[in-house]
Image (cartoon, rainbow, N blue to C red):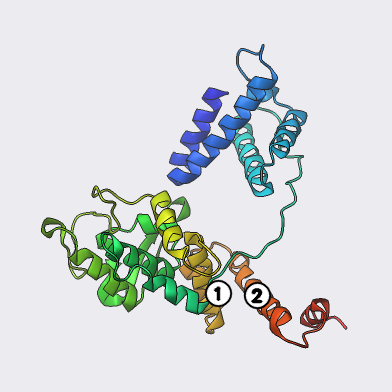
Amino acid sequence: MDDAIRAFMTFLELERHASHETVRSYASDLRQFQAFMSAEHPGMPTLNPAAVKTESIRAYLHWLDRKREKSTSMARKLASLRSFYRYLQREDMVGLNPAEAIRTPKQAKHLPRVLTKDDAAALMEFPAGQTGSSARDCALLETLYSTGARVSELVGINLEDLRASEGLVHLRGKGRKERIVPIGDVALRAIQAYLDQRPLMDSRDLTTKRASSPIFRNSRGGRLTTRSVARIVAHYSNRLVGGPVSPHTLRHSFATHLLDEGADLRSIQEMLGHASLSTTQKYTHLATDQLLAVYDKTHPRAGRPTTVRAVKDGKP
């Protein structure tokens, strides 16, 4: 199975142009399944992918469930196995896909957290006046909220990707897809303030174009990682009433706040880099559901929530 997994990783990188994080996630999921199968069959010298049956994958999912794995993680790991075996089928390495017949574990329905506009504004101000990397952190937070960029896209921004005079930034998204999105003046000023604090030999002006150089750097001068950005966002957002949030919460907030202010779904779809409009439409439901939740919780005569939702759905 080792050779098959390595071949699949190469396929993801070279043909599917998957991101490093995606490849690492697939590899981790498949290696875990391989370790499970090896533990279940200790006398088997090597695991042949063609020998894996549907029952084996069911047993694996049952084992994950006993470990109290989240349903979202179980669903992802099952999807990894499905994709792996689809690749093996295309390469004529197996005849059947043992993961295809297994239903995806039921997902708990929950609304992703979205910051209020006041909380978002407060979060942008938290790094101000602090020492050390506060200028970088302020620029980082402003850029996430101003562009709706994924965290992987944020860390990939280079100096030449900024078109400050036009108010635009070039992002490299999932599957090496690229797009150009607006970036606000407040974020651009924060980036310029951060660049002005770098050592003289590294100082740049946004109106000039230089060789590829990352905008957001760590203390050693290297490109920030996605995990570092997540820690930075959690550090400052821990001061919010609801507790810390992830960088993706700022992406959710970006889209929801645009929708609240009247932006059309097609424009939001372009800015978020969604391939399908149906993916963007979840923000319509998110905004409506949050409105209903606030109404049900705060209005003294809101009545039964089901009554309000029945009217929303057009039911008598």
Tell me: residue 221, above or below residue 195.
above
Q: Secondary structure at mark 2?
A: helix
Camera sees residue 128:
yes
Expressed as whole percent of the image width and height from the top left, the position of residue 299 reads 72, 86
> On the image, numbered disc 2 is attached to which residue?
290
Residue at 75%, 31% in the rendered image: 59
- Could you give the CA–CA distance between mark 1 and mark 2, rounded to whole angstroms? 10 Å
Tell me: residue 225, above or below residue 182.
above
CB atoms of marks 1 and 2 within 8 Å: yes
1 vs 2, front mark: 2
Residue furthest out toward the bottom: 301
**Sequence-wise, which precedes: disc 1 or disc 2?**
1
Q: Amino acid at mark 2?
A: Gln
Q: Nearer the viewer, residue 137 or 191?
A: 137
Residue furthest out toward the right: 316
Q: How many numbered callouts? A: 2
Q: Using residue 210 as the reference point, say whether residue 291 is left or right of it.
A: right
Is the C terminus in the top left, top right, bottom left or bottom right quadrant?
Answer: bottom right
Residue at 60%, 16% in the rendered image: 46
Camera sees residue 16:
no
Q: Nearer the viewer, residue 70 or 282?
A: 70
Q: Secondary structure at mark 1?
A: helix
Residue furthest out toward the left: 201
Is the N terminus in the top left, top right, bottom left or bottom right quadrant?
Answer: top right
Tell me: residue 149, above or below residue 295.
above
Expressed as whole percent of the image width and height from the top left, the position of residue 62 reads 75, 35
Expressed as whole percent of the image width and height from the top left, the position of residue 247 reads 47, 60
- In the rendering, which numbered label is found on residue 256? 1
